[in-house]
Image: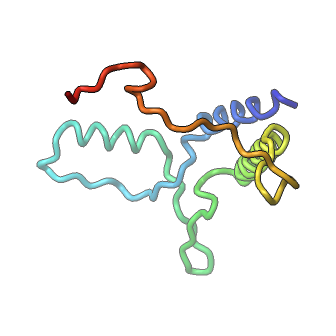
Amino acid sequence: MARLAPCCLLALAAMAVLQRGNTFIASVAPRFDEKATAGTVAGAAAAMGLASPAGAFVYDGKEYFDIWFGIDPLYWGITAFSIVAYGAVLKNAALKYNKPYGTNTLEAPQPLESKPFVQKLDEDNIPTWKK
């Protein structure tokens, strides 16, 4: 069970890498200004190359867009389950290993051990700079 969360995260990362081409981008051709630099053009071309256009579809004369942003609903479900499962693992670990402290959790709580404040000069036996 302890190895389940890292395996789920690794699988989620692998799915994200494999599905990176299915992100939502409108299928309108990019328009560049003639004064655009080569770096801007190269950056835009790289950004457009990372994702394929999801495109809109028309139903009864009305244009609709993909509400899943080009990602299959299965992967949305796996992501939601992974987030909830990882949150449950964190909550259970916090409840198991954190020691409760306070007046609402213990009948007669003992204060944390503390010592009075000692200045650094006194603690290290350093003479003061004042004469």
Residue 112 is situated, as x and y percent measured from the top left of the image, at 70, 41
Residue 42 is left or right of residue 101, and the answer is left
Give the quarter of the figure containing the C terminus: top left
Tell me the quarter of the image containing the N terminus.
top right
Name the residue located 47 percent from the left edge and 55 percent from the top edge.
25
Q: How many marks?
A: 0
Viewer-proximal residue among 128 and 57: 128
Q: Quadrant of residue 111?
A: top right
Residue nearer the viewer, 56 or 111:
111
Q: Quadrant of residue 58?
A: bottom right
Q: Residue at x 19, y 37 (%)?
A: 38
- Residue 76: % across, % down: 70, 52
Q: Is residue 85 visible?
A: no
**In this figure, which colouring scheme has been used for the structure?**
rainbow
Q: What residue occupies the far front of the structure in this picture?
A: 131
In this rendering, the answer to whether 84 lies above or below 126 is below
Residue 29 visible in rendering: yes
Above or below 14: residue 98: below
Residue 61, quarter of picture: bottom right
Residue 62: where, in percent of width, then height? 56, 79
Residue at (61, 40) in percent of width and height: 19
Q: In the displayed structure, would residue 106 be above or below residue 5?
A: below
Identify the residue shown where x is 60% and y is 63%.
66
Image x and y of residue 80, in percent: 73, 52
In the picture, measured across the screen, residue 65 lies left or right of residue 35, that is right
